[in-house]
Amino acid sequence: MTTALSDSPPASDRRRWIALAIVMTASFMDLVDVTIVNVAVPSIQRDLHASFSAIQWVTGGYALAFAIGLITGGRLGDIYGRKRIFLIGVTGFTLASVLCGLADGPTMLVATRVLQGATAALMVPQVLAIIHATFPAEERGKVFGMFGAVVGLGAVSGPLLGALLTEWNLAGLEWRPIFLINLPVGIAGLLLGRRFIDESKAPHSLRLDLVGVALGALGLLMLLYPLTQGRESHWPLWGFVSMVLSVPVLVGFVYWERVKTRRDGSPLVELSLFRVRSFAAGLGVQLVFGVVLGIFFLVWTLYMQLGLGWSPLRAGLTGIPFSIAVSLAAGLSVQQLVPRFGRKVLQAGALVMALGMVIYVWEDSRYGAGIHSWQMALPLAVMGLGMGLIVAPLTDAVLAEVPKSEAGSASGLLNTTQQLGNALGLGLVSVVFFPVVDSARPGSPIALVFGHAFRHTLSWLMAGLAVALLLMFALPRKAAPAPESAEPAPAGLVTEPVG
């Protein structure tokens, strides 16, 4: 059965709720996979004898492939059918997860993580579009609320699940079960999805912008590959040349998107959105915020496990105050604070996050290698409160002045920017963290070396939050109804935690 996007309810009430459970389970699988890997990074490095740049690619390769493919994945679902592309994505994601779990070296693991990110980009954008096509308008608020709860659960449970699976060392597999656990979930999702999800497509014919995909991917790789690989290769000349040449390639991407818009109205990126000042500034906020979080979560894990020598489980449990604070502040900000104070809530979030980092720097300077998990609870809780004040209302603030007819494209671009920020942040770890480690005097205690590098990194992250704070002044003071009354199809809308 194939339907266009509409408000007509499906024939079977039971079928649609089963379909909802299937797509939410697939989303949960992806969300957990985003957050589950960081806590296992030191174990992966030891087991595979991987370099630090390879470890950066294990996390950054997924984010980059996901970001590049996100808008394309949504467009493929519109053209060829959301059920079909969703099931292809689930199949690919499951196979890629198994290959990650079977990786015999860092090269294979990086390659399969990139494949995993690319297949997630096929799977994830279909979720909200399937919900939109399956449920009538009066029920979508409740359903999207359930989806938000799944997002929160994935963000909270991912690091802890990764810590437990790594610590338990099931069948002597060490870190590998964090990927292999996706096999039974993926198989179930594939079999049930074939039976219970109804097919749907966009009501208007669209074309895929393959040239735009190629130019965008090439430009980003030319920027991010030397940034991530540069430290290990001793910052060769070709790396700087590649980063410089990425600028004209990305300029060429923008030019092509203009040509594509005039030619058939099916560009990969709708450039007219950038005429909305608040949207353009909001993308800047999302990019900087993604960079800050991408750097923090990887560096924080390395600091705790390699620097302080903590186990994956202890590191995972240490992060619980952060996750709880994010959830509490996110709910409070959307329901009570933003309606009264508007963008000031997001600006307060940036300041509160920076305050948490200041506390963290002070505590690490005072306690050094003797710092305990309970002593980290205060700065982590403060940082979590700040993040919750930003991450929950940011999408609405950025889209507030975007015409509703363009909300689907704008949402996809916003979330793509978040993933690009994450990938860029993971690459910048080679610039803000590892040089401090490398410059330490031989024989220095590793806990002190990593502590110094961690504090140095936090100072850069505070500067990043200051940039985000300034960009937030271009957001609307208060949320207002977006122009035009047509309800958007949320094909590209995804919300992913970073970490």
Image (cartoon, grey):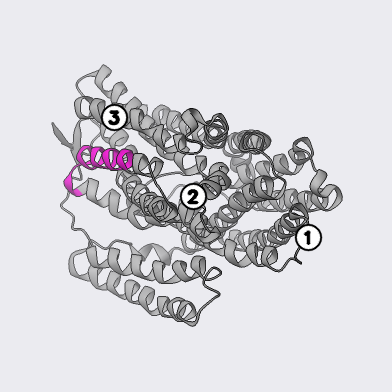
Q: Which residue is mark 2?
A: 48
- Mark 2, secondary structure of its residue: helix
Identify the residue at image location x=22%, y=19%.
12
Say whether marks 2 and 3 touch (CB < 8 Å): no
Q: Which residues are magenta?
A: 79-95
Identified by mark 3, the residue type is: Ile
Q: Amino acid at mark 1?
A: Ser
Label 3 and label 1: CA atoms lie apart by 49 Å
Q: Is residue 481 above or below residue 175?
A: below
* Secondary structure category for the residue under label 1: loop
Q: Which residue matches tag 1?
A: 444
Please tell me whether residue 88 belongs to the stretch shown in magenta. Answer: yes
Residue tagged 3? 187
Q: Position of residue 386 (x, y in %)?
A: 66, 46
Residue in front for this viewpoint, 346 or 236: 236
Q: CA distance from mark 2 to mark 1?
A: 26 Å
Which of the two discs, 3 and 1, labels the residue nearer the N terminus? 3
Count of numbered circles on the image:
3
Residue 9 visible in the displayed image? no
Q: Is residue 145 magenta?
A: no
